[in-house]
Image (cartoon, rainbow, N blue to C red):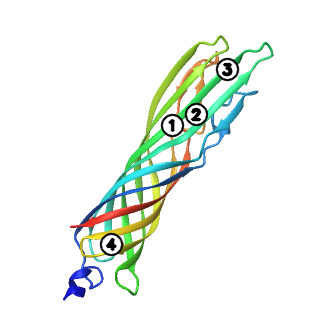
Amino acid sequence: NTALLGSSIGQGGYSPFYAGAGVGNVKTDGTDKQFCDLCQGSQFSMRNHNNNGYKLYGGVNLSDQVAIEGEIVDFGKTYDLDMYRPTLDGRAERAHATTKARGVGVSAKVRKHLRNGRTSIYGKGGALAWETKNHMDYTNLDNISETYKSRNRGVSPTLGIGVEHEFNARWSMRVGWDHYFKVGRSDRYLHVDENRNVDDLRSVKTDVDMVYVGATFNF
């Protein structure tokens, strides 16, 4: 009886609902070439492409193999760049540009149980509605500083794979990799007008990968 009750998945049953939380590493592929078209002569330094990310997820099991899963995810910084442009008279122009991203997603999830019954592998695909917050601290050649901010929103497709292991009928753990395609609005971060004044900040398109560990409660 203990073995039968110990794993609803292992005996062919399944919990109708689940919810969990995960933490992991976020990697992006933004580059300094995406910053500005009119920044010739500038020196760039991309900060770490790796970042900590967090997510809350939950789902409805339609069967033992198929589920609909939703998530709320915070990627932290998806773009982080320093710009420095010196001039011959000893002055310099500086900027520090960042983008933070978060989103709400939904996916269809399919899983297959391994022989031990408690462990399964899964794949999922869906979409993420994201929001980015862009922030740039800028100091001009006269050493006057200004701060610029903007927000962008959009939708990107997502894919994911992972492994889940059920400890008992209520608790399980997963290790997953999720890929989010082209999170961001534009191919360039900084947009200027004909007088080279700041016109707009737009989050650059970057693929986002998140590898995470999650704890799941099955209802």
Q: Earlier in the sequence, mark 2 or mark 4?
A: 4
Q: What residue would you read off at disc 4?
A: 66
Q: Quadrant of residue 112?
A: bottom left
Cα distance, mark 3 to mark 1?
20 Å
Q: Position of residue 63 (x, y in %)?
A: 27, 75
Task: Establish if 14 lies above or below 94.
Answer: below
User: Do labels 2 and 1 touch, CB within 8 Å?
Assistant: yes
Identify the residue at horizontal 55%, vertical 51% (top origin): 27
Cα distance, mark 2 to mark 4?
40 Å
* Left or right of 122 on screen, residue 197: right
Q: What residue would you read off at disc 2?
A: 189
Q: Nearer the viewer, mark 2 or mark 1?
A: 1
Q: Earlier in the sequence, mark 1 or mark 4?
A: 4
Q: Earlier in the sequence, mark 2 or mark 1?
A: 1
Quick one: SS at disc 4?
A: strand
User: Do labels 3 and 1 touch, CB within 8 Å?
Assistant: no
Q: Quadrant of residue 1?
A: bottom left
